[in-house]
Amino acid sequence: MITTKNTLEVTTQNDEQLMVSIANGNKKAFDALYARYEKKMFYFFFRKLNNNQEKSEDFLHDLFMKIIEKPEAFDTSKAFSPWFYSVAHNMVKNEYKKMEVRKIMDTESDTTRIVNRELDPMHSAEEQLFKQRLFEELSHLNQDSSTAFIMKYHEGYSIEEIAKALNIKEGTVKSKLFYAKQVLSEKLEMFNPKN
């Protein structure tokens, strides 16, 4: 049983240890986990929910409420992050089922993890157009392919982690990523400079 006495101890715990602490009623552990994942999960929802800030905030709130209400739903012998993305992915899937329509996503949100460098104005405009088209085309892919692509190439998750999060085989993840890259390379060919 893991207990913490101060904030410093809590912030040095890994995600799985924090979940044990949360299950034991430690509010500081929840605060630490929230601080680690708030921006990532908001961004995930924002991309998946058509850049709707209000809805993304609601989904973020609901996601963390699941942890508060049922921390025991997480198997602490497994990795937390893939499980957490899996929960978020399922929330979005359920929302799409309710909406029955997938809307095109634009890219008004923070994309510093995709591009984190100073660009000249011309290049910056082209980069912004590329990102807009990229996420627009991602919205046309099936949900699993789009999520796998974002998790792999935006968040840096491994094939194994993505497979666990989406509850599919690693080979299926690789196929979905291959398919997504093929489609995107065709759709975004105009951005590929020919030497």
Image: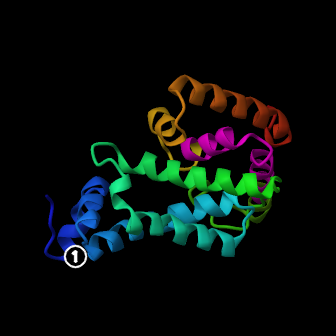
User: Is residue 78 toward the left or the right of residue 34 in the image?
Assistant: left
Q: Position of residue 39 (x, y in %)?
A: 51, 67
Q: Position of residue 121 (x, y in %)?
A: 76, 65
Disc 1 residue type (three-letter): Thr
Q: Nearer the viewer, residue 125 or 154?
A: 154
The answer to whether 26 is drawn above or below residue 174 in the figure is: below
Quadrant of the rendered image containing residue 37: bottom left
Q: Position of residue 43 (x, y in %)?
A: 59, 62
Which residue is under mark 1?
Answer: 7
Which residue appears at 79% of the width and 61% of the height?
125
Which residue appears at 57% of the width and 66% of the height?
42
Q: Quadrant of the C terminus?
A: top right
Which residue appears at 56% of the width and 57% of the height?
113
User: Is residue 162 toward the left or the right of residue 179 in the image?
Assistant: left
Q: Which residues are magenta?
A: 128-152
Classify 10 Å Cα crowding around label 1: few (below 14), some (14-19), many (20 and above). few
The answer to whether 61 is drawn above or below residue 132 in the figure is: below
Q: Is residue 131 visible?
A: no
Q: Nearer the viewer, residue 24 or 38?
A: 24
Which residue appears at 62% of the width and 61% of the height?
45
Q: Is residue 169 visible?
A: yes
User: Is residue 188 toward the left or the right of residue 69 in the image?
Assistant: right
